[in-house]
Image (cartoon, helix red, strand yellow):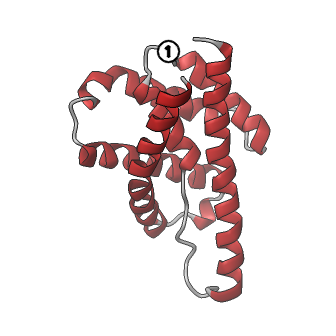
C-alpha cells in the first residue's frame, strides 16, 4: 500500500480521536455546569471505530504492524501512555483479521453489536487503567449504545471516503 494511503487512513483516525477529545471537553463542561449530581455517562470512541472500519474494509492492506504504528502515533499525538493504543490497535487488528470473512456475511446489526462491544471493551480498559475511581457500568452501557449508534454513520462515511480517495 502506498504511503499516501497510509497517511490518509491515519488522518481519518487522528480526526476521530480529535473529535473524541472535543466531545469529551464539551461534555465535561456541561457536566460541571449543570449535572454535577449525576454520574458522567458519555464516552465515544470515534477514532477506535474508524480504525476498526479500515481494518474491516481493507484487511489485506492494513496489517497488524500498520495498526501498531497508528497506535504509536496516536499515543504520541494525544499524550496517552505509550503502548496503550498500540496494544489495543494491534489486538483488534488481530481479531478482525482472524474473523474478517465471517464478518463479511454478518448483517449490519451484528456488526453494530460486535464493534460497539469492542469499543466498550476499549473504554472499560481505558477507565480501569487511567481512572479506576470513575469506572462505572452505567458508563459502559451508555458507551455501548452511543458507539453502536455511531457505527453505521462511520461505516457509510468511511466507505464513501474509501471509494473516492483510495
Q: Residue at x 72, y 76 (%)?
A: 29
| Looking at the image, residue 127 lies above or below residue 36 | above
Instruction: Mark yes or no: residue 57 visible.
Output: yes
Residue lying at the far top of the rendered structure: 1
Residue 104, by quadrant, is top left
Label 1 SS? loop
Q: Residue at x 72, y 37 (%)?
A: 75
Image position of 154 (left or right of 77): left
| Looking at the image, residue 129 lies above or below residue 103 | below
Q: How many marks?
A: 1
Image position of 81 (left or right of 85): right
Dot 1: within a 10 Å radius of its alpha carbon, few (fewer than 14), some, or many (20 or more) residues? Answer: some
Q: Residue at x 55, y 31 (%)?
A: 89
Q: Position of residue 150 (x, y in %)?
A: 44, 55
| Looking at the image, residue 98 lies above or below residue 125 | above
Image position of 105 (left or right of 137): left
Q: Position of residue 95 (x, y in %)?
A: 39, 27
Of 7 and 147, the residue lying toward us: 7
Of 63 and 5, the residue lying toward us: 5
Residue lying at the far front of the rendered structure: 164
Of 90 and 54, the residue lying toward us: 54
Q: Position of residue 30 (x, y in %)?
A: 67, 79
Of 26 and 143, the residue lying toward us: 26
| Residue of label 1 | 61
Q: What quarter of the picture does the C terminus occupy?
A: top right
Q: What quarter of the picture does the N terminus occupy?
A: top right
Residue 40, by quadrant, is bottom right
Amino acid at each position: 500500500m502506498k504511503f499516501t494511503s497510509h497517511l490518509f487512513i491515519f488522518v481519518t483516525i487522528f480526526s476521530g480521536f480529535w473529535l473524541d477529545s472535543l466531545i469529551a471537553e464539551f461534555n465535561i463542561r456541561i457536566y460541571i455546569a449543570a449535572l454535577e449530581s449525576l454520574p458522567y455517562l458519555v464516552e465515544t470512541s470515534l477514532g477506535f471505530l474508524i480504525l476498526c472500519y479500515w481494518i474491516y474494509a481493507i484487511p489485506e492492506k492494513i496489517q497488524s504492524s500498520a495498526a501498531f504504528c497508528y497506535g504509536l502515533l496516536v499515543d504520541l499525538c494525544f499524550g496517552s501512555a505509550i503502548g496503550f493504543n498500540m496494544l489495543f490497535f494491534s489486538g483488534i487488528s488481530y481479531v478482525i483479521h482472524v474473523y474478517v470473512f465471517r464478518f463479511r456475511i454478518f448483517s449490519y446489526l451484528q456488526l453494530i453489536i460486535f464493534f460497539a462491544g469492542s469499543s466498550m471493551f476499549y473504554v472499560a480498559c481505558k477507565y480501569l487503567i487511567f481512572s479506576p475511581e470513575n469506572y462505572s457500568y452505567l458508563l459502559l452501557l451508555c458507551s455501548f449504545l452511543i458507539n453502536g449508534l455511531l457505527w453505521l454513520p462511520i461505516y457509510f462515511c468511511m466507505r464513501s471516503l474509501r471509494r473516492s480517495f483510495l
